[in-house]
Image: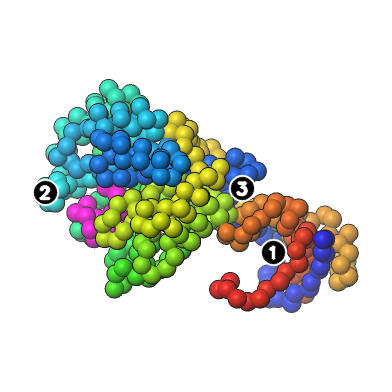
Amino acid sequence: MKRRTSVALAVLIVLITAGCAVSGSENDKTKASASQTGQQVFIGVFREGAPRNMGYIKQFVDQTGKKPAMVMWYQDWAQKFPAEAAQNVVDFGAVPHIVWEPWYWGNRDKVKLDDIIAGKWDDYIKSWAKEIIAFKSPVFLRVGHEFNIDGYPWGIVHNEKDPEKYVKAYRHIVDVFRKEKVNNAKWIWCFMNYSFPDEPWNDWTKAYPGNDYVDWIGIDGYNWGKTQSWSDWQAFKYLFRDQVRQCRELWPDKPIMVAEFASAEKGGDKAAWIRELPGYLKSSMRDIDAIIWFDLKKEADWRITSSDKSLAAFKEIMKDPIFSSSGQAMAALSLTGKKAEKRLAEALRNYGTITVDGDLKEWGKCRPISMADRSFVKEGSDWGGPEDLSGLAYVMWDDEYLYFAADITDKIPLVNKQQKQD
């Protein structure tokens, strides 16, 4: 079904030139739906005991039918580079991802940012650099993660509320690696999706070390449900969508991973929460390049096996071709030079007469917004492609009005029973 409509809107506007640019939609990294362009979201997992014991990861594959592209685990600064464990991951065909925490697990005050900046930990940092050179395969390092909450001594809140101190320490670590000529380390700069405390000095954007020091941007976040007195049920999109959009706007050539995420059971339908993920990733959250499930029963039961329904839902979504198991492709991914492009419409000056009659021939010189991919479709919707729902949107103006016209293809006309939130 084709629909054509034109509407005159009386608005107060200031138009300085004969043509003006109107933003068409969110920034787009030039990737459409998975079925159209082969969009990939790399899947990763953390399971306690792995990768020293890769049986936990093989069990994940048996349970979900999907091999992870990345295996993530944690190391403190009392430990040397875990070459054997990392090699287990490489032999499995995945990428090692080490959350390198600058503290001792038995002594949280052992490592201080001031001491890192002053070079007092350089010998230790160099030892990792040299071991990683000898390792040869790519290694992802997530240093000082979640710096915008109060849970870690490297957090901004514990360092004079000065994000620049964190930046200096992060850069110093990377610079030590560079002096050792390490070229197989990938650096993940990672913040928590919500800052705590939520104060201007704790704004995560202020702690960005710079494009030269970051290979991937990471975001951590959890659906706590009703497990805590302060928490409530949150959909995946509300945990990460705004943050992802802000990262893409600020740093358009950096791949983005949800570096830790999971959902509790209490307070909602975890299986439904899981089933929604592909729809979000294919629509307004297409800028996410990787997701890593935190598979552990800890503050809540974050495991995919927390219930039979949750496991069945996870196994179901892993069949979607959007999820990639290729560690090699993940290690090689780069968006350098692929700047985000704003889709624009050109609003032309109209010197004639606009007739609101459904005939759009006088709009031919306008450059319309083309709405022909999943980014224009509500998350989770069953979209069948441009022939199902698509359109062109035109804008013109004169001294009195802003004019809008749309040419829409829609197989099923709008039926809004107003039964849901949207």
Q: Residues within 10 Å of mark 1 (few under 14, many from 20)?
A: few
Front residue of 29 and 348: 29
Instruction: State the predominant SS element of the stretch in magenta.
Output: loop
Q: Give the x, y percent position of residue 300.
A: 29, 61
Q: Is residue 320 left or right of residue 45?
A: right
Q: Image point 53% across, 52% down: which residue?
A: 278
Q: Residues within 10 Å of mark 2 (few under 14, many from 20)?
A: few
Q: Give the x, y percent position of residue 126.
A: 21, 30
Q: Residue 106 carries which label?
A: 2
Quadrant housing residue 202: bottom left
Of pointers 3 and 2, the one earlier in the residue sequence: 3
Q: Name the residue under label 1.
A: 16
Work out which quarter of the rendered image holds the C terminus and state it. bottom right
Identify residue type, mark 3. Answer: Ser
Work out which quarter of the rendered image holds the N terminus and state it. bottom right
Of pointers 2 and 1, the one earlier in the residue sequence: 1
Farthest residue, direction front: 308
Q: In what element is the residue under mark 2?
A: loop
Front residue of 364 and 221: 221
For discs 2 and 1, the disc positioned in front in the rendered view: 2
> Does residue 327 appear anywhere in the picture?
yes
Q: In what element is the residue under mark 3?
A: loop
> Does residue 240 appear anywhere in the picture?
no
Q: Give the x, y percent position of residue 273.
A: 46, 60
Is 242 included in the stretch rendered in magenta?
no
Identify residue type, mark 1. Answer: Ile
Front residue of 248 and 137: 137
Q: Mark 3 points at which residue?
A: 33
Identify residue type, mark 2. Answer: Gly
Q: Which range is magenta?
A: 139-156
Contact between marks 1 and 3 (CB within 8 A): the answer is no
